[in-house]
Amino acid sequence: MRKADYLIIGQGIAGTMLSWFLLQAGKSVVVIDDAKPNSASRVAAGIINPVSGRRFEPAWMYDTIYPFAKNTYLQLSALLQVPVFTERQLWTVFPSAQMRDAFLHKTTGNDYTELPAALKYEAFLDQPFGAAIVHGATVNLPSLLPAYRQYLKDREALQETHFDVNVLEITPTGIIYEDIQADKLIFCDGVATTALPFFERVKFLPNKGEVLLIKVPGLETMDIIKKGITLVPQDHGVFWAGSSFVWDYEDDHPTVQQREVLEQRLSQLLMVPYEVVGHLSAVRPSGNDRRPIVGFHPDYPAIGIFNGLGTKGCSLAPFMAAHFKDVLVSNAPLMPEIALQRYF
Ligand SMILES: Cc1cc2nc3c(=O)[nH]c(=O)nc-3n(C[C@H](O)[C@H](O)[C@H](O)COP(=O)(O)OP(=O)(O)OC[C@H]3O[C@@H](n4cnc5c(N)ncnc54)[C@H](O)[C@@H]3O)c2cc1C
């Protein structure tokens, strides 16, 4: 029987960060991940944006979580020898005069935004109401996740298989899963967690996002471009163009309807032809109050959850995982806003 302090299900950004901080704290960890190709972390663009949504509200806890996330990603980049973190400007095109006024009203005086001295991308973008610069970043998930997976494999801390909850045995001192005996099991399994018997009382509000991968001849930039749809530069001249939000969906596959929605938004942004080279989709694991969902089941103290990262996995995961580690290792009090307990 193999013994571990923690068995973690899932190696998206949640399981990556939680296992990383637990290993750093000297704990033994086994991660089980089935490498679902269209998990949220494998489809996301990895944008970190200091302002949220159409109302341009400052993102929750941004001044705390952003420097922490940046530091964590830079450390992992140095350790794993892959590019992980890039600070970028978000070229935010105003769709209307009202939106420009709302932006100026909400963001004047903060450090994250500025008005450009001159318009850029005039040959490519339809921007009659102008644009603003928002200072954000991207996390390179397609390089971070496999590199960290290899790091776990090298330590014999990763099992590439599907976790079957029916095989789980809860004992008086922890759990047994096949040949693994652990003190605690923590579900970092994204939207799959909604099907588990343990978290039926949690008010999940998962939503599906679809994305096109496009090429725009002549458009070369490091900036993120945003107006109803967001373009994020990738390798080889490809842009990630997304994403939609759908709460009522049949499955997690790409649809003709959402492709039309995305293409319509592209036509409102781009004044030049483009070529679609890919179409992706995934479901965001969100709770009804848009806060992370963290803690242990009141009736099964060995069963935990680290989830609910919603639209902001890349900015929230490092700080929240480190905080959960402090709760686990040093008995720190769990932030009530994110406690699983709020649903019980
Ligand atoms: C289209 C789209 C765009 C997005 N863009 C951004 C963005 O720009 N910036 C941002 O911060 N966030 C973005 N998000 C949100 C972000 O993707 C999520 O917040 C984040 O990825 C959630 O990570 P997670 O680790 O909780 O879940 P997931 O990424 O879903 O990871 C769960 C993992 O668990 C594994 N798993 C599940 N069940 C099992 C099982 N039974 N056995 C074994 N393994 C299992 C899966 O294979 C997967 O690897 C976006 C999401 C979508 C869908």
Image (cartoon, rainbow, N blue to C red):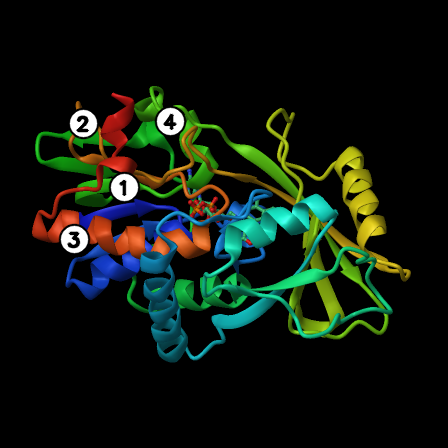
Q: CA distance from mark 2 to mark 1?
A: 12 Å
**The C terminus lies in quadrant:** top left
**Residue type (three-letter) at the residue carrying disc 2:** Tyr
Where is residue 292 shown, x and y percent of the image?
35, 40
* Ligand 1 is within 8 Å of the C-beta of the residue at disc 1: no
Q: Earlier in the sequence, mark 3 or mark 1?
A: 1
Q: CA distance from mark 4 to mark 1?
A: 12 Å
In the drawing, what numbered circle is on residue 300? 2
* Ligand 1 is within 8 Å of the C-beta of the residue at disc 4: no
Pointer 2 and pointer 1: residues touching (CB < 8 Å)? no
Where is residue 35 shown, x and y percent of the image?
49, 50
Where is residue 192 shown, x and y percent of the image?
45, 34
Q: CA distance from mark 2 to mark 4?
A: 13 Å
Q: CA distance from mark 2 to mark 3?
A: 20 Å
Q: Is residue 79 left or right of residue 312?
A: left
Q: Earlier in the sequence, mark 2 or mark 1?
A: 1
In the drawing, what numbered circle is on residue 196? 4
Name the residue carrying label 3.
326
Q: Earlier in the sequence, mark 4 or mark 3?
A: 4
Q: Is residue 262 visible?
A: yes
Which element type, helix, strand or loop, lies under badge 3?
helix
Q: Is residue 140 above or below residue 253?
A: below
Name the residue carrying label 1.
186
Which element type, helix, strand or loop, lies under badge 1?
strand
Task: Look at discs 4 and 3 and give the one toward the viewer.
Answer: 3
Which element type, helix, strand or loop, lies under badge 4?
loop
Pointer 4 and pointer 3: residues touching (CB < 8 Å)? no
